[in-house]
Each structure stands twice: as C-alpha cells, then as structure tokens.
Image: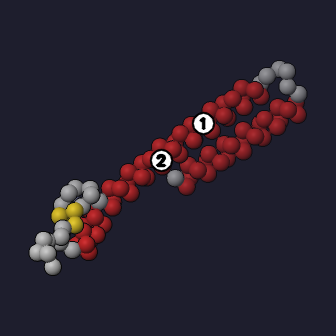
Amino acid sequence: MTGEKKVYKCKYCGAEFDKPLLLAHHVRAKHKRAKKREKKGVEVEKRTDQMNKAVEAIGILKGLQVSPSLSAEEKKILGDVSKRIEDVLLYLQKVT
Ligand SMILES: [Zn+2]
C-alpha cells in the first residue's frame, strides 16, 4: 500500500469511483444508452442514404425505359429490374 488512493475515472463525464465495478456500473447506467442511440442514428442515416440512392436508380431505370431506341424486350428487362429494386425498398421500409 502506498497510501495513495486509486480512483477510476469515467471517460465520458469525468466522475470518479474508487472501485472499477462502480465505474462499470455507472458507465452502463449513464452512458451506454446514449452511445447506442448515437450509433443507431448513424446507421439510420446510412440506410436513408442507401434508400435515396436506390430511389434514384429506379428513376434512372424508368427514364431509360421510355427511351425510343430500346427494344420491347430491353424495356421489359429494365421494368423488371426497377420492380425488383422497388420490392427491396418496400421490404426495407417494412423492417425498419
Ligand atoms: Zn460518467
């Protein structure tokens, strides 16, 4: 024993604890939820970004679909592909 008291400092708010268990408990109670929420926010943002890109892709495909230089078969393929992307988007919106 050196006589010096060891303290465990919270890296989020600087609160001090004399036992690591108390610090762990504090972090779990006070900061874990905020951290999780922050992470979820980033994920939602990423997902929204991806969805916007998919909507944009559908727009491009639909624009191509009405092009007079395409054969009926090519137009059908473009229609099928955009339908497939739309289905994925609908599914994602449902599970979000
Ligand atoms: Zn803290």
Q: Which residue is mark 1?
A: 53
Q: Nearer the viewer, residue 26 or 82?
A: 26
Q: Is residue 44 left or right of residue 55?
A: left
Residue visible at 24% across and 68% down in the picture: 23
Q: Does any atom of ligand 1 lie closer than 8 Å to the CB of label 1?
A: no
| Residue 74, image x, y percentages | 85, 32
Q: Is residue 14 above or below residue 50?
A: below
Q: Secondary structure at mark 2?
A: helix
Residue visible at 28% across and 64% down in the picture: 27
Q: Amino acid at mark 2?
A: Val
Q: Secondary structure at mark 1?
A: helix
Q: Which residue is mark 2?
A: 44
Q: Is residue 82 left or right of residue 25?
A: right
Q: Residue furthest front?
A: 2
Q: Amino acid at mark 1?
A: Lys
| Residue 35, image x, y percentages | 35, 56
Q: Nearer the viewer, residue 54 or 76?
A: 54
